[in-house]
Image: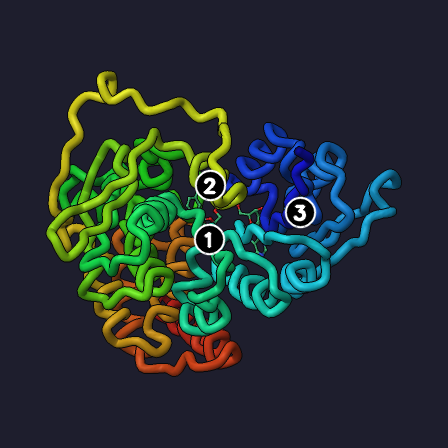
Amino acid sequence: MIMKKRRISILGSTGSIGRQALDIVARHPDRFEVAALSAHSRSDELFEQIRAFRPKAAGLSGDRAEIPADLRGLDWYFGKDCLERIASEVDCDDVLVSVVGIAGLDSVISARKAGKRVLLANKEALVAGGQLVMDLCPQDNEDPVLIPVDSEHSAIYQCLLANKGNPFTKIILTASGGPFRTWTLDKIQDAGINEALNHPNWSMGQKITIDSASMFNKALEMIEARWLFHAKPEQIEVIIHPQSIIHSLVEFVDGVQLAQLGVPDMRAPIAFAMAYPDRISTGSDPLRLDQTGILSFEAPDLTRFPALRLSMEAMKQGGAAPCVLNAANEVAVDLFLKERIRFGDINRIVEESLNRKGHLRADSLSAVHEADAIARETALSLVGV
Ligand code: NAD
Ligand code: MG
């Protein structure tokens, strides 16, 4: 039987998720065709990807570069709005949004408005504009219109699918605890960049790696889960599981929990989203529990890692509070990577920004962007920038 290829646009194709998605395409040329690719910088890498995967369109959202002669025949998109234009204008079935930060929000909205399925790696879009995105994702659609790529959310999605519509009572997100899981509060305050970038289990982009060290990654994922699965804030829990083998769990009314397990390799959740409802090979090693050793669990420590408390507070407050949390965190991570602030300042900047601006509204896309801009200014002003 000849299978119709799914045509995928990959926004942020030069990143960690984008490159792994292309690895899946390369393993299954009979299933996937690349419609468009985009990058923010590293244009040379984008050009190589275009030569290998032959999309009809491509975009550079950051600095404009000279397009090589052999690639000038493509439909090129440049500049700030290039992601949303690719998402709506380029003919395709799926849009994988794998850019980092709130830059992903408008493209998610524009892909949905154009009737495309969104494969969502970019968690910041849901954190900042969750209500707006979910309003464009009807639950009663026969085919899903939004499939999560984040490993925890893919795990939950798979557990819920296996349970055929039974409502959950709890969503339990696992967290590795990051490189500072066993560090004292004092030591964490002054952690260095290389220590924060040294994640024990996953190799990822810089921003999410810093977020994993501060546990803001899990804070963002709590809010991401709240929207994706229509959960109440109090239904979302986090448990530390240093081995990252159980990717998350769902609890049902009978007290039973379903979990999804696998080795920590993002190609599995990426491929799950890309090939849904089929399962395909990913190049990832199968899980061998007899060689995994002990799986351990502990409660998160909210004193050393206040991010989880701030996330719960922001979720309960609603409005633009999660958007402010996200924006202040993006600013703080950037300042930390530029060696302008200490690691411990990240928490302080986010908490103070929430105190000052958490009350803002988020009921339209322009209100979200306004709250994002105000939160960024506030966060910068806290460090005198
Ligand atoms: P990355 O930094 O490796 O790659 C980011 C990509 O987005 C690059 O292609 C870059 O050119 C592009 N980009 C950066 N800034 C941009 C901007 N302002 N506008 C448009 N494009 C921009 O990031 P990553 O680790 O691949 O993460 C991407 C997203 O996926 C993040 O939201 C992250 O939280 C999420 N995620 C990543 C992983 C992982 O394993 N890497 C796991 C789960 C979720
Ligand atoms: Mg994750």
- CA gap between label 3 and label 1 equals 16 Å
Q: Is residue 245 positioned above or below 213 on the image?
A: above
The amino acid type, in three-letter code, at marker 2 is Phe
The amino acid type, in three-letter code, at marker 3 is Arg
Judged from this view, the residue extending furthest toward the top is 291
The image's mark for residue 147 is 1
All told, the count of numbered labels is 3
Residue 71 in view here: yes
Nearest to the observer: residue 255 or residue 318: 255
Pointer 3 residue Cβ closer than 8 Å to ligand 1: no
- CA gap between label 3 and label 2 equals 15 Å
User: At which x and y percent is residue 222?
Assistant: 29, 58
Can you say which quadrant of the picture contains the N terminus? top right
Q: Is residue 107 positioned above or below 190 on the image?
A: below
Give the residue number, with chain letter if any, for mark 2: 272
What residue is rendered at 73% in x and 39% in y?
Answer: 50
* SS for callout 3: strand
Contact (Cβ within 8 Å) of mark 1 with mark 2: yes
Give the residue number, with chain letter if any, for mark 3: 7
Pointer 1 residue Cβ closer than 8 Å to ligand 1: no
The amino acid type, in three-letter code, at marker 1 is Ile
Residue 317, image quadrant: bottom left
Q: Which of the marked residues, 3 or 1, is nearer the chain's N terminus?
A: 3
What residue is rendered at 49% in x and 29% in y?
Answer: 282
